[in-house]
Image (cartoon, grey):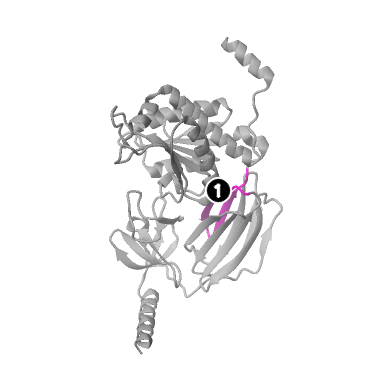
Amino acid sequence: MKKVLFVASMLVCTMVHAQHAVTSYSVGKTTGDLPYMEYGLGDDRLGGAKMTYLDTNVLVRVVDSVKDDYEVQLSRSRFAYLPKSSVVFDSVRHIKPYYLTGSCKVYGDSLYDYVNVLLDEKLPYTSIQQINPSRIVVDIFGATSNTNWITQLSTAKEIKNTWYEQVDNDVFRLIIELKHPQHWGHTIYYDRNKLVIRVKQQPANERWGKLKIAIDAGHGGANRGAEGVTSKILEKDYTLLFAQQLEQVLKKKGFDVFMTRNNDTTLDMIERVYMLREYQPDVLLSLHLNSAGNDTVKGTSTYYRYIGFRPLTQSVMKRMLQTGLSEFGNVGNFNFALSGPTDYPNCLTEIAFLSNVDDEKKVLDAGFRKKVANQIYLGLNDWLATNGIIVPKPSPQKAKKTKNKTS
């Protein structure tokens, strides 16, 4: 009897919550710079766990207000949280009982493949990367399928297959299977009533010399970062030294290199992300120096947010261990702002601990900084090689001329 009463009470609670979610809400839309959704109300120094970034003017159903966030209902059974600064209320727009998807088209140009999905409205979405096989899975919330054909043109070079599943009455799932194991990045945005998933093609081997590598020297200006335990050096100054050393190495190898900063300037994360969007790198390498409350903690580590970008961080980590640094680890699902964009493979390297005396001595050594730059390049090169992109060595004749010139 008690069990029956418990089940009955749970059903009543569920119905009340569902009724509240359906009938008591406000209509809003995303706004501002890089609006994002979070899974819950948890928080730490990097912020809450992010679900996805969204385009602007995306329709959202606001069902509650909690401190600095709005709770939004994505579908009948899915909820998320948006910062209040990323939502404006819209008294003109209304939420319909259902929204339909239309036809889909898959095609490509010289750098990207595209998947277009026709929709009645700009609806919220999420995306994840999958590996073995490599796929991009996009969930569109509030959408019900009326997609009766998906047209794929031969101009698509990276997308192998595209199909959909209606995983819930109001969740439309698009599955995009890739031809290569490596994820090279994807971007999601709206073009009027079309949701566009832009997929980066794997660069052709002959394009190695045109690969665009972005380097971000962590911190800068008013953002001082960590401090040396004995020397009192600042992280912002030495990340720039490491970055400039890496820039020299990569340019010497023939890469197109972009630095988010070349001096001690203050840049917030949004500014950096927009700079990177404009440059559209093939790879981002972020450089930081670590710190811990325990001065015995030391070593090097690499970080990634999305599983499809992990191989790059593993290759860099393997090479960094050849510097003599101990291993602090390869860290995934890292909720750092520059690890958040899905647009390009990225690797954040925490080179060493400024809070550890032994690591600090290495950081102060100019020879060590050159070695680190070379090891990060080798890690990048190893990763490119596993994807069939071989950086050619200088010909013997060219190497001889260079040697004669220096002698």
* Span shown in magenta: 181-202
Q: Quadrant of residue 13?
A: bottom left
**Mark 1 belongs to which amino acid?**
Gly
Q: Which residue is mark 1?
A: 185
Left or right: residue 335 versus residue 100 is: left
118 shown above or below 373 = below
Q: Nearer the viewer, residue 337 or 242?
A: 242
Residue drawn where x is 65% and y is 23% of the image: 394
15 shown above or below 138 = below
Left or right: residue 307 versus residue 31 is: right
Residue 273, x across and y down, in percent:
44, 43
Residue drawn where x is 35% and y is 39% of the image: 297
Do we see residue 281 in this rendering? no
Residue 73, x across and y down, in percent:
41, 68
Residue drawn where x is 52% and y is 63% of the image: 139
Q: Quadrant of residue 326?
A: top left
Is 65 magenta? The answer is no
Q: Nearer the viewer, residue 290 or 306?
A: 290
Residue 382, x across and y down, in percent:
59, 36
Which secondary structure, mark 1? loop
Residue 320, x across and y down, in percent:
49, 34
Mark 1 neighbour density, 10 Å: few (under 14) some (14–19) many (20 or more): many
218 shown above or below 163 = above
Q: Nearer the viewer, residue 42 or 101?
A: 42
Q: Quadrant of residue 61?
A: bottom left
